[in-house]
Image (cartoon, rainbow, N blue to C red):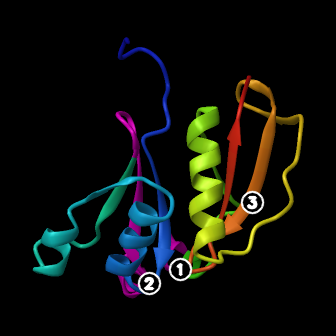
Amino acid sequence: MTNHTTRLDHVVLWVSDPVAAADFYESVVGLEPLRVAEFSEGEVSFPSVRVNEETILDLAPRSLAERMNMLPGSADSAGHPVNHVCLSLPSAGFDALLARLETRGVPMTDIGHDSFGARGKAMRNFYFRDPDGNVLEARHYA
């Protein structure tokens, strides 16, 4: 891996309870939580969850919005989630996530096929929401 390729580093999601959100992303989605204890102890502003070795999702409390002053209007984005975040999984990981969501009664869309993404057409995909209303897509390629 080189340092000369553009990569996605992180996406910030607005959440009402970062600890609960981290638990959802760990226990339901299967992502590794980061800095949850430090957040709970007031040492950091938000926890995160690891998507892979290069990418994380930051779970920012909506109360941080008033401090978002790096660009005019940044605070106005609080509470407005992105359209969706897509997680690409291996086939077994896709099936495991689907099973965990079903077990917990998390509403999902039907399974789609041949949805276009970064690696071409995905064999299967579906959408679901986290407890804060952020929409996630899960997919796997051949």
Horizontal side, residue 74 vs residue 66: left or right: right
Whether label 1 touches label 3, CB < 8 Å: no
Q: The residue tagged with tag 1: helix, strand or loop?
A: loop
Q: Which residue is mark 3?
A: 127
Q: Which residue is mark 2?
A: 62
Horizontal side, residue 60 vs residue 35: left or right: right
Could you give the CA–CA distance between mark 1 and mark 3, rounded to whole angstroms?
A: 22 Å
Q: Of the residues under marks 3 and 2, which one precedes in the sequence?
A: 2
**The residue stretch that appears in magenta:** 51-75
Could you give the CA–CA distance between mark 2 and mark 1, rounded to whole angstroms?
A: 6 Å
Q: Of the residues under marks 1 and 3, which one precedes in the sequence?
A: 1
Which quadrant of the view contains residue 76? bottom right
Q: In the image shown, does 61 or 37 lie closer to the viewer?
A: 37
Horizontal side, residue 60 vs residue 121: left or right: left
Q: Nearer the viewer, mark 3 or mark 2?
A: 3
Label 2 crowd bin: few (<14), some (14–19), many (20+), radius 10 Å: some
